[in-house]
Amino acid sequence: MKITLKDGSVKEYAESKSVYDIAMDISEGLARAACAGQVNGKVVDLRTVVEEDCDLNILTANDKEGLAVLRHTTSHVLAEAVKNLFPDAKITIGPSIENGFYYDFDHAPFSREDLDNLEAEMKKIIKKGDKLEKFTLPREEAIKFMEERQEPYKVELIRDLPEDAEISFYRQGDFVDLCAGPHLMSTKSIKAFKLISSSGAYWRGKSENAMLQRIYGTAFNKKEELAEYLEYLDNIKNRDHNKLGREMELFTTVDVIGQGLPLLMPKGAKMIQTLQRWIEDEEEKRGYVRTKTPLMAKSDLYKISGHWDHYKEGMFVLGDEEKDKEVMALRPMTCPFQYYVYKASQKSYRDLPIRYGETSTLFRNEDSGEMHGLTRVRQFTIS
Ligand SMILES: [Zn+2]
């Protein structure tokens, strides 16, 4: 068979070979650094045996896809560690994400101390260096397998797979996870990882489902890369407007007033005033004329603008459509109002262009989970 490598060179073999063996044949260093293979574009385990002509790319942690395999494998190590230290925890899913990975568990919230203990347990697992071995089971046996292990979420996932899907599992030591892969060959190849944080997350992202505990972590090819990333996270934390703004007494929030409804304190209000004056002067210089329109309107306006049909969930509606003759809603946008300013008089083409400006306060009913500092709020002002 002919294997075409990424650089265009071709390797020929008389018999089938695993991706790992091909990497070895290219260079021992490459095989050592390899995380996965990419056969005709599809990311696969290094153990995957290549049997016919194909394009092959050996992925290392320097490739986005290779790094994702490393991180995802680390999530399996985390799951094994959780089962070792908290045998009652139920496992669910653990994908790689942009800057690392997470794994969701049905368990009581994890403290930072728990995460530290889990990191120590993960180091033991990595040192042991179990191989990750894939096996498949027919659907009914796969369900029975996870039922016996008392993993109801895994059973649910298997039941949701198409009837003819190949149901694959990966074993590392005594720990087995339902997973499509791919993974590293051995846990030993995980050189640098860190558990970052833990927070609640609903099973399958739906609020009617069970609340799970999500542990976020990350992994890198080298200890130095991990250290650099952790330093970056620290810097972000120190520059977080939500932290700084409160420390500098620019704004605050109060439970009885509500989430997403920040109170600008004198220093913050002064900043807003300065900004608003500058914007309004600048707009005037650029030929804008000011309007001042109401903060609320009857539902009739929003029915014309389309908000009522498409955005009612995100609006603060005052009143009950079934009972009240007139239902009002706080405005999520200014343009439907300014439209009626324009429409109030006859215009000639000589009047154009007309530029209306308004420093206007808007209201959007965000989910309480989405609120953050001054970036996701329920009331805000734009100009
Ligand atoms: Zn996996």
Image: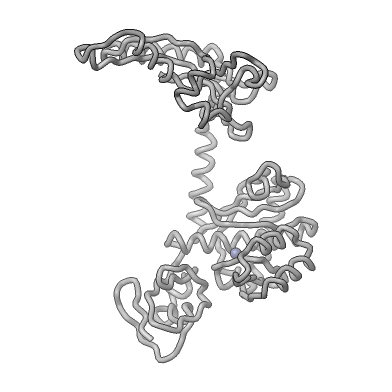
Of the pair 352 and 65, the residue shown nearer to us: 352
Q: Which residue is drawn at 57% across and 16% down?
A: 328
View extreme (left): residue: 350
| In the image: residue 276, left or right of residue 319 | left
Q: In which quarter of the image is the C terminus?
A: top left
Q: Is residue 47 above or below residue 374?
A: below
Residue 97: x, y in percent?
53, 53
Q: Quadrant of residue 154?
A: bottom right
| In the image: residue 264, left or right of residue 304 | right
Q: Is residue 350 above or below residue 100?
A: above
Q: Which residue is drawn at 34% across and 71% down?
A: 6
Q: In this rendering, does residue 19 appear at all?
A: yes
Q: Which residue is drawn at 42% across and 9% down?
A: 292
Residue 25: x, y in percent?
41, 82
Of the pair 273 and 204, the residue shown nearer to us: 204
Q: Quadrant of residue 275?
A: top left
Assign ligand 1 to one image quadrant.
bottom right
Q: In this rendering, does residue 250 appear at all?
A: no
Q: How many numbered marks have been drawn onto this rendered protein structure? A: 0
Q: Quadrant of the N terminus?
A: bottom left
Residue 224: x, y in percent?
49, 55
Q: Residue at x 73, y 47 (%)?
A: 210
Of the pair 372 and 207, the residue shown nearer to us: 207
Q: In this view, does 375 lie above or below 187?
A: above
Q: In which quarter of the image is residue 129?
A: bottom right
Q: Which colour scheme is used?
A: one colour
Residue 24: x, y in percent?
44, 80
